[in-house]
Amino acid sequence: MLELRPLLITGLITALLTGCSSRSVAPSTAVAHADNSCNQRLLQLQQRIETEAVADPFGYRIDGYPYLRIDRFLASFDHQLTDPVRFDHWYQQLYQLGQQGRAIEMANLQPPYPDQDRQQVEHCIEQQATADRQAAHFQQRLIDQAQVPELYSGWQQALGLFPLTRQIVLQQIDKQQKLWRQDFNSPELLSGSSRRFVPPPSASLTQQQIGDWLQQAQQADPLTIPQLDPPQLQALFGHFAPVWQLFQPSQSDWIGSLYWRHDLPQLNSSDPTSYLIPSYTRFDGQILLQLNYLVWFAERPAQSVLDLYSGRLDGLLWRVTLDSDGSVLLYDSIHPCGCYHQIFPVSPRLRLKPIESDIERPLIVTAVAAKRTEGRTVLQLTGQDHFLQGIGGQETEPQVISPPSAEFNSSEADHPQTSRYRFDHYQRLRSLPSLRGHRNLFSPNGLVAGTERLERWLLWPMGVDSPGAMRVWGQHAIGFANRRYFDQPDLLQSLLERQP
């Protein structure tokens, strides 16, 4: 299996110095309009959060409104909020993000914030929010402030001679993508022993039923966001869940759930788990629902004495983008570091937009991704490095023939061992069990501590914070030569178009 980053490093090595940076969370300001007891309570809470380093990096705090949070999708509505009903609905999304983040931070304190104190905190926040909304020009001021910060470091790019080094990157990306397409679904890479992880049984859904759900949800939402009811969303996650197949599996190729032990995230391989999170994208003037499935591995083991890409934890994030009629528009995937973005169009009408030569082209693999109506998608990963190297199909629901186990019986190489994985919410990662209570998998800077790779010392001129390290949703920079994010609401629209 060839990979992109070694080729990039070969071209960049003569131009690189050393250095790195990390995003820090700015301290929140105290409540300005609440009474003194509220001010004191909120200041004490914020001091504890900062002292114990439990600030939750999911979403971004808004300057002047520390109780609200924003993400890229919600920020994309900045020119669509002139109607009071739409603005109020948008505001509630920001408020709920902030409320969720506060709850997680208070739960991760040691000891956790008592329930009675949490209620008092929320009461103080409500006072602040009411006072803010009565202020002159509140609506426009909030819209102006509700911005997501740029995560690419300008000073790193300037110091790393980015205009020069990005040309080397573009050349190497083009070479690597040709090799990747050539090797995709290669029998040589996808042969021998394997282990399959299959999703929980799910109810059968029709495309018509799914399309009706999406249409009804859009019509009921003031912002036309297809926000489904929890049972409907859960049913869709079950319906579109993939089968994960690992070839030449070893101890490092077991899907599991995460927990904390001895200040390091650990993987429980006896509990295969896929963490789920919905997202949304803008395409052809509509907002489309996306289903995201994330699995974790204990590590990417070193394959040489000086392996620049090995380290604790690895994984793969698989995303299903649904068209408005309930069909699959496309699939795409990344590793939890934001690396190796791949796009798999399903609709035959999709094509790559004309892209100038100095723009980083996405890796688009065509004619491999099946529709869900043709059976479950089987994601075929190579062992140890966990590259998505093939896509197959499973017409019938596979049977589980072995319970979860860290042992592999090579005598069953011709008949893949099959284990069942379960679903869990992505938000669970923000408050995992530890020996002293609960702890966020992600540090306040958005990275998973202890997952740094040596490659970060070589690729820092691209402006990406700690390339190779695992990171939180919303911080997946997926471009080296251009600024591009996995959760960018216009990502697909900027790359693809629908033929008439």
Image (cartoon, rainbow, N blue to C red):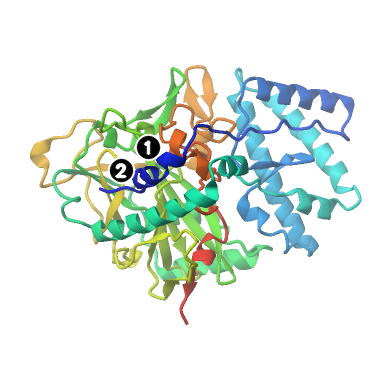
Which percent across, then down, holds residue 175?
A: 33, 57
In the displayed structure, does residue 305 sit left or right of residue 362?
left
Residue 395: image x %, image y %?
24, 61
| Front-lying residue, 44 or 270 | 44
Q: Tell me which residue sits at (68%, 40%) in the image.
A: 98
Label 1 residue SS? strand
| Residue 247, picture quadrant | top left
Q: Which residue is mark 1?
A: 314
Tell me where residue 67 sits by quadrant. top right
Where 499 sits versus 447, above or below?
A: below
Q: Is residue 70 above or below residue 269?
A: below
At horizontal 58% and vertical 33% (from top left) the residue drawn is: 445
Whether pointer 2 and pointer 1 mark residues with C-beta atoms closer than 8 Å, the reply is yes
Label 1 sits on what residue type?
A: Asp
Name the secondary structure under disc 2: loop
**Amino acid, disc 2:** His
**x, y (%) of residue 486?**
50, 52
Residue 72 vs residue 494: left or right?
A: right
Which of pointers 2 and 1 lies earlier in the amino acid sequence?
1
Instruction: Work out whether residue 114 can be spotted.
Output: no
Query: Number of callouts in the render?
Result: 2
Q: Is residue 334 visible?
A: yes
Q: Quadrant of residue 295?
A: top left
Give the left or right position of residue 194, taking residue 180 as reference. left
- In front: 367, or 461? 461
| Picture disc at residue 386 | 2
Residue at 88 percent across and 25 percent down: it is 36
